[in-house]
Amino acid sequence: MSKKEGKAKGSGIVQKLDKEITDELNPDQEREQQIAIPLATNAEARYPKLSLPGRHLSAAQAAAPQQQQTQGSLQIANVFGQVQEKALGQVRKALTLPEVAALLKVTDPLTDRIEIPYTMLEFWRMHDTYRRDGTARRAVNLLADFTLGDRTMNVLDVTKEYPTKAQHDAAQKQLQANTEAQNVKAELDRINRVVNFDHWCTAAFVQCKVFGRAVLVIQDDPQTGLPDSLKLLSSMRLGRIFVNQVTWEIEGVEYIDYQGIQSIIPKDKMIYFTNLDYGISPNTLGMGLATLRLSWTYPKQIARLGRWTSKN
């Protein structure tokens, strides 16, 4: 076999394995509804528009009104533009932008046209890379340990800039002698221990590195109004972000596993993590960039190709 023929045969094997993996990850979807690995020229597949949830449905399906069913499975389109089965008796209806603006009490213009830079197939490959690839998992965990350290702590320090070090030290000494400030610090230290801040911050950091963003929901004590727990949301289930068009601040995040008004997480009730959030891809500022993006290109294909080579 010539070198050219061997190269062509190897390329055909890789394409065949890639097709098998795509079929495995989408076993219940029809062929025309499956999501292929996005190409650089396929901008619509790579950057799904959140405001067009039915873009993978036919024109008749998209135009048909949403109906509730009491039993059986129902095909619905989620915010990632995919069609999936839902055996529950109700279709999840996303809140409209005016409804979200009223809920968040935002008077400035609000937009949800920020695009999710990955397809669900890509999210699952990142997920599988972290779970199955010990080297990749160890690298992310080590980065979390190095960045966050053994534990976090609250520090009292002045925020004003002083022209001389002596003036800074005097202001710092005065702050340390302030009883009220010391009491506030002690209360913050207590809250950190109660909510297990170190653990949940590490968990959010890992999800942020794997998927590009993460959310910790802050749950308050109804009597004191102070935080009493942190809830980590699944980054794969995060939906739209709602951005203030005047200040460019994120006013809220949608969590697609919740229903109605509970699906919108206001900014004052969450800690929002993003990784490498520099808006490299158009219209994705606020979505972050996954660290594992480069490591899942052909992990399973290479493993299968190795087994095929050993047999032949």
Image (tube, grey):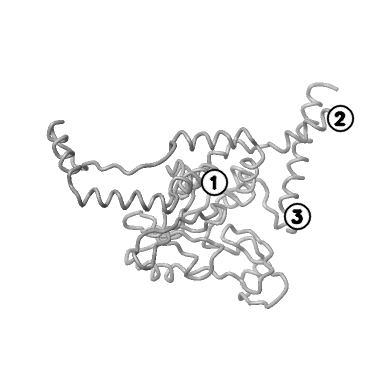
Q: Which mark is residue 311?
A: 2
**Quarter of the image with the N terminus in it:** top right
User: Which residue is pictured at 13% across the width and 37% down the height?
Assistant: 170
Front residue (pair 99, 273):
273
* Real-space CA distance between mark 1 and mark 2, rounded to the nearest whole angstrom: 36 Å
Mark 1 and mark 3 lie on one chain; the one further toward the N terminus is: 3
Count of labels in the image:
3
Amino acid at the residue labelled 1: Phe
Q: Which residue is mark 1?
A: 211
Q: Which mark is residue 27?
A: 3
Q: Is residue 183 above or below residue 152?
A: below
The x, y position of residue 43, in whole percent, is 57, 49
When the figure is inspected, residue 284 is found, relative to residue 299, above or below; the finding is below
Q: Nearer the viewer, residue 56 or 206?
A: 206
Callout 1: helix, strand or loop? helix
Q: Nearer the viewer, residue 27 or 63?
A: 27
Disc 2 marks which amino acid?
Lys
In terms of secondary structure, where does tag 2 sit?
Answer: helix
> Residue 306, percent across and down?
78, 30
- Circle 3 crowding by C-alpha within 10 Å: few under 14, some 14–19, many from 20: few
**Measuring 35% from the left and 42% from the top, which residue is drawn there?**
153
